[in-house]
Image: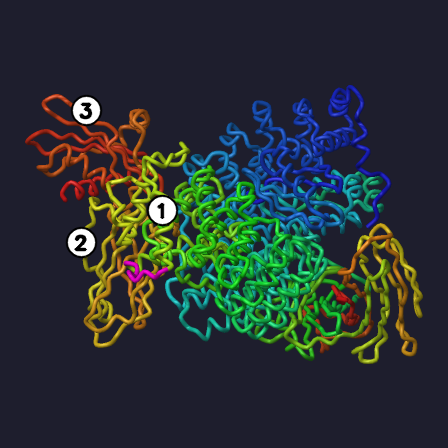
């Protein structure tokens, strides 16, 4: 098509003074053509961001016309400026209302569509009637336009949509005869639900509706298909048969040309697959999923990027799907960098013995490319392959050594970092290469590489002749080093000292004094004190701790935690899948508590990457090994002697604490606490004075909070011989489900797993169920299941009901529990004293309830204590008349709901309780929780 | 609300068009995009998804233009990306090209199109055939007609296909000559390493159609070897169920040009590599040596045409001096690309190129090993072996002319050195 000479750029040539004035004159011209030209000029100015709002009246005057193009142009203008001129916008209402009655469906639809776009509260009043008519219009084009308009109206005034019953009408449109109308109704509903979950009650997606949707799926536009597939994601099929039938009806979508349709279909299939036990069918589905995923990689780079982020999740969840497709992820030199990095990630995930030779050859190729970030990641990838695919380790190490020979600075440093991990994974296997590594000492200038090198020197000090010289050279610039390097250097020198005490006494003294006396860094100082203390009190224990055998590092360090992965699988194709974080973590306006928890998860996952902080682990190991061996060798005696001679054991008073920010406690108390918790026995125990310090690092339970005795929740008769008893408890700021699994059959049981259905507080297992398997006949196993509050949320009746499925090698069993409310009260629930009255007043009186509690013989003090122990916080107390005690309490649920209370205690009478909250449903739960707390 | 606003940004970072479907979003929202744009080493490297405080910026880069969509809620990024590509496709169809100047020249049509394509952030009408009926493309003829008759470029009736079950086809199509052409075009993507081993190879095929048939024809196409096609995606007109069950493409075609099917033959199957390239490129003693030989390999006797070899030289290289047995070479000192235009490969004359590159004194690029990009075209060959068996037409009575053509081309064909 040719572009004519008369181009629209002429509309921009109106830059001179008095422009607005001229336009005004033209807009009021009698000639139709001139008017239209003028409106076009106005629109052109608007598109480039010029302010032409002064012409509002004049442009609106042009609205009443039979000329559709002119009408559309005026509408464009109106949508843009109505917000700034609400009063004038009202003037246009009459024309809109008239147009909604026009015999031409195009004009009816245009009018209702434009009216909805004018985001002025006042105009909505006039919108309702025309909208109601249009939703029932005989022409499907008008109906489909009106459906979207409901979403627009909801955004401006949610209340009006609910009052006028538009949600129900929208629900009816789900069964419309025209697929395009159905698709738009689905889209509008999902948008409304996104901002207003309460609306779900009025729009019910049940089995017949789903059937309608699946039928519409075949006939509507590609965008409609996306909306429909998305809405199917929220539907839980009744049984496996329905699951399979839905899957079968969706799979053809995988061949759609639109990448978004394909990925939406992948999402629904991945989710439903979990609920299908028929392994043949699952296999077949997995086979069908591979080709479309690979095809996405030949689309535009932006699409590739999103696809790769999603494939990353798919591969973690079901590694089989793409195991033969690794070549599709080989990097092309002209891929954009963001695609390259993602491809590399997936290559490592798919690396296996069968393809490792090819993968390594590729990685080596990438390590010589130009882009620094990419090269680094490629080198790192080689290390990860070595750790993941054991038979390839040798080859990986050789490759890394070759890369070190290139002497390219950042390649060398990256290689050393990963070699450290390889040493951890395969101890005593590749130490011959240490000398090659030492040759590159001088070129290391990045903290991570320096720390890695120091770790290697410390760990293998006995094999490196000049280990002390090397560490000494690092020590000279101690204060200029990064914390990471300092910590590593401290540990390495202590290791060296324990291995070669004679030669390195001076070195260790120097590093300890540098770390404890000259440093502002609390972590460094604490670690310094711990070593110091350890070396001076019990050198044998020190050896045991510092040189303890380290647990092997796991193969895949950056896997997403399983519950999070399951949640992300449900969000495939969305932004969440790109960020690898649940929507609650970054979309505004979600439940805040979930946000915090989720962030913690995400950070945890990030930290797990590569970094092995050995000291954290050695503690836990000491706990397991118990008291250290008492046979102290000559070298150890010498160590003890040296330290006791030269260094008086630091006492609390002697050690200056030169920071104010970190902790107020005397250092020794802190140490004492740690050791007390660790129960090192021997010397350490003598120093330790476990008082009631607030830094309860190792003790596991706060003894005073109430935990109900376990009750049978699943009788053996209902579960083929498995009896489950359970209770819920709050410990260490977390929720735990304590379970006893009793085997009443004649055979051993194993393969236990547990899953929660959606529930009001998003409770979900925070870890897989750990049971020592098998559970033998007539034996019961107890376990404690950590529970997180980041699961999917659905309001239950009663509020605290949770449906749980427990699986063993026999079958899956279902049961229900009611979670006691008090385990959901968080530790941060103490409201500030001055906020309390303010909030109390803000809550309307109809949201208050009075209860009279059963008689208690506890004193006021005892009542306060047991409340506080259960996170019902006492904000204030007051003496009332007649010897009454008034206790004001606050409670905060895990999802951020506050409940305020006023408890009246009178001598010789039953106490009364008044509760107030914005969320009335919570009141009765808090009431029964307080009753339970006071009764026990 | 899926898409709140779209900003059109040119190479130098100016916003030259903005369209808002909801409240107006300030231009400053793009600041973080500009930061990313400045940081990116090449324009293609700007990450497609950027998060700001309150908004998500999802962008595409095409024809030296960035389209940046602003959204405030959890959306499907692919949906937004696909939609923006659709916008660019539509503009290209309307204005022949989709450059900044083309958009500026047709700003009113652009604005009307954007308004028609998206309503409140929901896609409204994205099918080209519906759009062209609603808003007339600015062709000379249309302009002339509107000048003479006073009719404007906006239709006042609802396009019939807007709601029909075949939204891609308009009703009442009539041709004097009824013809349907099908071009089966295969792109070979390959990575070949320095020793000539195929690292990965795959074929991306498209069946491009140009159909001019009257009325509502219902076509069905079958293949001799449909088993090759296990990874396909179809134009919405194709009945997916029928393909699943019988491996027959059954469809009511859109009017005009469209892509009926694209398919992908992956690395798992053996892919025939039609050309070989032997290359030696190394840099020593202050100069570079180049020696490249190209020849046909598995072409089933067909001639390899339009052969072009492109070598991205290291940035230190200042000049190249080559001798070629066939074709001509050029060196672009700005992009540092050495381009060798071979054309047709004659059976008896093996194309070679030898020569040296100059480096400035003291420059070292010992480790440089540029990846060579190869272009070629082979007519009358579908390298995968795909063949159309027959094409039938139902629902209409005339006899159409039917034609099928096969072409194999180089896609992303890379040879490492």
Residue A861, numbered circle: none
State the CA–CA distance, disc 3 to disc 1.
60 Å
Say whether residue A104 is left or right of residue A234. right
Residue appearing at x 49%, y 67% in the figure = A426
Q: Label 3 neighbourhood size at 10 Å, few (<14), some (14-19), many (20+)?
A: few
Where is residue B387 shown, x and y percent of the image?
A: 73, 77
Q: Which mark is residue A709?
A: 2
Q: Quadrant of residue B69?
A: top right
Task: Tell which of A314 and B5 is nearer to you.
Answer: A314
Mark toward the start of the polypeptide (3 vs 1): 1
Residue A176 located within the stretch drawn in magenta:
no
What span is in magenta?
A627-634
- Tell me: A343 left or right of A934: right
Q: Are marks 1 and 2 in contact (CB under 8 Å)?
A: no
- In the rendered image of this protein, does residue A830 appear above or below residue A550? above
Q: Which residue is mark 1?
A: A645
The residue positioned 85% from the left and 58% from the top of the image is: B286
Left/right of residue A399 with respect to residue A630 in the rendered view: right
Q: Of tags 3 and 1, which is closer to the observer?
A: 1
Q: Earlier in the sequence, mark 1 or mark 2?
A: 1
């Amino acid at each position: 098509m040719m572009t004519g000479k008369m181009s629209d750029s002429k509309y921009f040539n109106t830059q001179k003074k008095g422009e607005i004035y001229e336009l005004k004159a033209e807009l009021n011209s009698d000639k139709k053509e001139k008017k239209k030209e003028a409106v076009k000029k106005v629109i052109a100015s608007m598109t480039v961001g010029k302010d032409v709002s002064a012409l509002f009246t004049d442009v609106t005057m042009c609205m009443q016309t039979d000329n559709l193009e002119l009408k559309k142009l005026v509408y464009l203008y109106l949508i843009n400026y109505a917000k700034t001129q609400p009063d004038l916008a009202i003037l246009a209402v009459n024309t809109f209302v008239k147009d909604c009655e026009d015999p031409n469906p195009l004009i009816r639809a245009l009018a209702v569509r434009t009216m909805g776009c004018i985001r002025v509260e006042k105009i909505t009043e006039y919108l309702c009637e025309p909208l109601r008519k249009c939703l029932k219009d005989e022409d499907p084009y008008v109906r489909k336009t009106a459906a979207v308009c409901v979403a627009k109206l909801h955004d401006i005034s949610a209340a009006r949509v609910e009052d006028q019953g538009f949600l129900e009408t929208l629900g009816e449109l789900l069964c419309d005869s025209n697929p395009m109308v159905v698709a738009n109704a689905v889209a509008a509903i999902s948008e409304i639900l996104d901002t207003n979950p309460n609306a779900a009650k009025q729009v019910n997606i049940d089995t017949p509706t789903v059937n309608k949707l699946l039928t519409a799926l075949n006939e509507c536009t590609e965008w409609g298909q996306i909306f429909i597939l998305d809405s199917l994601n929220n539907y839980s099929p009744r049984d496996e048969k329905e699951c399979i039938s839905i899957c079968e009806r969706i799979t053809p979508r995988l061949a759609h040309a639109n990448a978004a349709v394909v990925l939406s279909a992948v999402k629904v299939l991945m989710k439903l697959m979990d609920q299908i036990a028929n392994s043949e069918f699952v296999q077949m589905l997995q086979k069908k999923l591979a080709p479309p995923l690979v095809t996405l990689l030949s689309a535009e780079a932006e699409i590739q990027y999103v696809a790769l982020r999603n494939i990353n999740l798919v591969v973690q969840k079901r590694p089989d799907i793409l195991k033969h497709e690794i070549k599709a992820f080989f990097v092309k030199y002209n891929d954009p960098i963001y695609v390259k990095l993602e491809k590399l990630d997936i290559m490592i995930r798919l690396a296996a013995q069968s393809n490792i030779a090819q993968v390594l050859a590729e990685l080596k190729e990438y390590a010589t490319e130009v882009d620094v970030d990419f090269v680094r990641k490629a080198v790192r990838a080689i290390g990860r392959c070595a750790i993941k695919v054991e038979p390839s380790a040798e080859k990986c190490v050789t490759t890394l050594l070759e890369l070190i020979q290139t002497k390219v600075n950042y390649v060398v440093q990256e290689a050393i970092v990963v070699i450290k991990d390889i040493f951890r994974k395969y101890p005593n296997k590749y130490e011959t290469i240490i000398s090659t590594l030492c040759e590159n000492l001088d070129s290391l200038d990045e903290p991570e590489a320096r720390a890695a090198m120091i770790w290697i020197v410390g760990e293998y000090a006995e094999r490196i002749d000049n280990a002390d010289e090397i560490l000494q050279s690092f020590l000279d610039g101690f204060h200029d080093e990064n914390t990471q390097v300092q910590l590593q250097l401290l540990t390495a020198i202590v290791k060296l000292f324990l291995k070669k005490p004679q030669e390195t006494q001076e070195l260790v003294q120097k590093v300890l004094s540098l770390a404890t006396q000259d440093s502002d860094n609390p972590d460094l100082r604490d670690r310094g004190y711990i070593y110091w203390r350890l070396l001076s009190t019990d050198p044998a224990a020190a050896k045991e701790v510092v040189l303890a055998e380290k647990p092997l590092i796991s193969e895949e360090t950056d896997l997403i935690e399983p519950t999070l992965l399951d949640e992300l699988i449900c969000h495939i194709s969305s932004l969440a899948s790109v960020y690898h974080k649940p929507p609650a973590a970054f979309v505004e306006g979600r439940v805040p508590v979930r946000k915090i928890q989720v962030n913690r998860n995400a950070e945890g996952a990030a930290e797990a990457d590569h970094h092995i902080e050995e000291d954290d682990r050695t503690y836990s190991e000491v706990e397991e090994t118990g008291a250290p061996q008492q046979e102290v060798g000559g070298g150890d005696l010498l160590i003890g002697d040296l330290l006791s001679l030269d260094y008086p054991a630091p006492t609390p008073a002697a050690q200056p604490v030169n920071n104010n920010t970190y902790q107020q406690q005397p250092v020794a108390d802190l140490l004492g606490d740690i050791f007390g918790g660790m129960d090192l026995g021997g010397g350490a125990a003598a120093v330790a004075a476990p008082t009631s310090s607030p830094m309860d690092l190792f003790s596991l339970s706060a003894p005073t909070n109430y935990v109900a005795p376990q009750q049978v929740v699943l009788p053996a008769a209902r579960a083929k011989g498995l009896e489950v008893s359970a209770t819920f408890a709050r410990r260490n700021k977390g929720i735990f489900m304590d379970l006893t699994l009793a085997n009443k059959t004649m055979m051993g049981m194993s393969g236990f797993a547990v899953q929660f259905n959606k529930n009001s507080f998003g409770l979900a297992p925070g870890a897989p169920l750990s049971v020592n398997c098998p559970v033998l006949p007539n034996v019961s196993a107890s376990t404690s299941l950590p529970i997180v509050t980041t699961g999917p949320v659905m309001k239950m009746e009663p509020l605290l009901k949770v449906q749980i499925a427990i699986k063993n090698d026999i079958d899956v069993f279902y049961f229900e529990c009611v979670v006691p409310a008090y385990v959901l009260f968080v530790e941060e629930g103490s409201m500030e004293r001055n906020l309390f009255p303010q909030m109390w007043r803000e809550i309307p009186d109809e949201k208050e309830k009075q209860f009279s509690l059963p008689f208690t013989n506890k004193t006021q003090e005892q009542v306060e204590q047991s409340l506080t122990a259960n996170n019902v916080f006492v904000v204030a107390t007051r003496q009332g008349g007649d010897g009454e005690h008034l206790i004001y309490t606050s409670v905060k649920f895990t999802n951020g709901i506050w409940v305020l209370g006023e408890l009246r205690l009178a001598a010789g009478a039953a106490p009364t309780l008044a509760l107030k909250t914005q969320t009335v449903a919570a009141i009765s739960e808090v009431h029964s929780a307080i009753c339970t707390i006071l009764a026990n | 609300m899926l898409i709140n606003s779209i900003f059109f940004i040119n190479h130098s970072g100016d916003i030259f068009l903005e369209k808002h479907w909801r409240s107006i979003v300030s231009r400053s929202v793009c600041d973080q995009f500009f930061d990313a744009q400045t940081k990116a080493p090449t324009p293609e490297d700007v990450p497609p998804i950027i998060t700001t405080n309150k908004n998500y910026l999802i962008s595409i880069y095409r024809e030296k233009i960035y389209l940046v969509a602003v959204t405030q809620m959890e959306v499907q990024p692919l949906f937004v990306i696909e939609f923006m590509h659709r916008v660019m496709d539509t503009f290209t169809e309307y204005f022949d090209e989709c450059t900044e100047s083309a958009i500026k020249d047709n700003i009113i049509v652009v604005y009307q199109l954007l308004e028609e394509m998206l309503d409140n952030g929901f896609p409204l009408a994205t099918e080209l055939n519906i759009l062209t009926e609603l808003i007339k493309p600015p062709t000379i003829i249309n302009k002339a007609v509107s000048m003479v008759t006073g009719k404007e470029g906006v239709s006042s009736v609802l396009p019939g296909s807007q709601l029909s079950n075949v939204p891609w086809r308009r009703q009442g199509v009539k041709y004097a000559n009824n013809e349907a052409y099908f071009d089966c075009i295969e792109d070979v993507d390959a990575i070949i390493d320095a020793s000539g081993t195929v690292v990965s190879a795959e074929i991306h095929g498209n069946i491009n159609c140009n159909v001019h048939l009257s009325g509502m024809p219902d076509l069905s196409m079958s293949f001799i070897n449909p088993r090759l096609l296990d990874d396909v995606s179809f134009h919405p007109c194709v009945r997916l169920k029928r393909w699943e069950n019988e491996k027959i493409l059954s469809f009511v075609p859109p009017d005009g040009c469209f892509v009926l099917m694209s398919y992908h033959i992956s690395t798992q199957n053996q892919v025939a590599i039609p050309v070989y390239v032997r290359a030696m490129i190394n840099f020593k003693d202050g100069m570079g040596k180049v020696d490249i030989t190209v020849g046909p390999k598995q072409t089933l006797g067909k001639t390899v045409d339009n052969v072009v070899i492109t070598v991205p030289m290291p940035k230190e290289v200042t000049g190249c001096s080559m001798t070629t047995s066939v074709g001509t070479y050029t060196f672009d000192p700005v992009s540092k690309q050495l381009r060798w235009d071979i054309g047709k490969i004659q059976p008896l004359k093996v194309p070679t190129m030898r020569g040296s590159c100059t480096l400035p004194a003291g420059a070292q690029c010992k480790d440089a090993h540029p990846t060579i990009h190869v272009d070629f075209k082979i007519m009358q060959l579908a390298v995968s072996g795909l063949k159309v068996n027959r094409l039938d037409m139902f629902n209409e009575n005339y006899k159409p002319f039917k034609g099928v053509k096969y072409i194999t081309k180089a896609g992303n064909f890379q040879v490492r050195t």
